[in-house]
Amino acid sequence: MAKIVQNPDSIRIRRIYEKPDGGYRVLVDRLWPRGVSKARAELDEWLKDLAPSTDLRKWFGHQEERWSGFQERYRRELAANPAVPDFSRDCASREDNVLLYGARSATENEAAVLREYLLGLTGGP
């Protein structure tokens, strides 16, 4: 089976508070980031359905000691999410996808988990 998203460089993650630098920009937070206007965000899409559930987001609370559990639980949510296969195919059709997040941590955020998950997906026979 082949990966749906074949080029790891085609999916980047960036904090929404950073200046836009091109690519197809998708916010993957369930909540709109404070202090960012829609014009400044320069979004192509806001996909709340790909974000962690409210319960998971509240449980995690960006507590470092819960990061491993968050990743595991969020991956389970993604595996059961019917929006993921279509989004994965959409990403594969574009050369530059930017998953945007609002968290302070550049490594412990939902966009990082989603990127890893999308790059690990496999297509059908």
Image: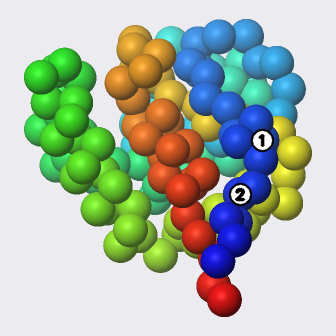
Where, by quadrant of the figure, is residue 44 drawn?
top right
Q: Is residue 105 above or below residue 77?
A: above
Q: Which residue in the protein does label 1 denote?
A: 10
| Residue 117 spot, x, y in % from top left | 49, 52
- Mark 2 residue element: loop
Residue 52, can we see it? yes
CB within 8 Å, label 1 to label 2: yes
- Relative depth, front residue between 45 and 105: 105
The relative height of residue 19 versus residue 76 in the rendered view (above or below) is above
Q: What type is the residue that disc 2 sits on?
A: Val
The location of residue 4, given as percent across then percent down, is 70, 66
Q: Image quadrant for the C terminus?
A: bottom right
Does 80 sit left or right of 86 as displayed? left
Rendering coords of residue 21 (x, y %): 82, 18
Kindly identify which numbered label has been placed on residue 5: 2
Decide which of tag 1 and tag 2 comes sooner along the chain.
2
- Residue at 77% across, 47% down: 7
Q: Residue at coordinates 30% horizontally, 51% vertically from top-left? A: 74
Q: Nearer the viewer, residue 5 or 13?
A: 5
Amino acid type of the residue tagged 1 in the rendering: Ser
Marking on residue 51:
none
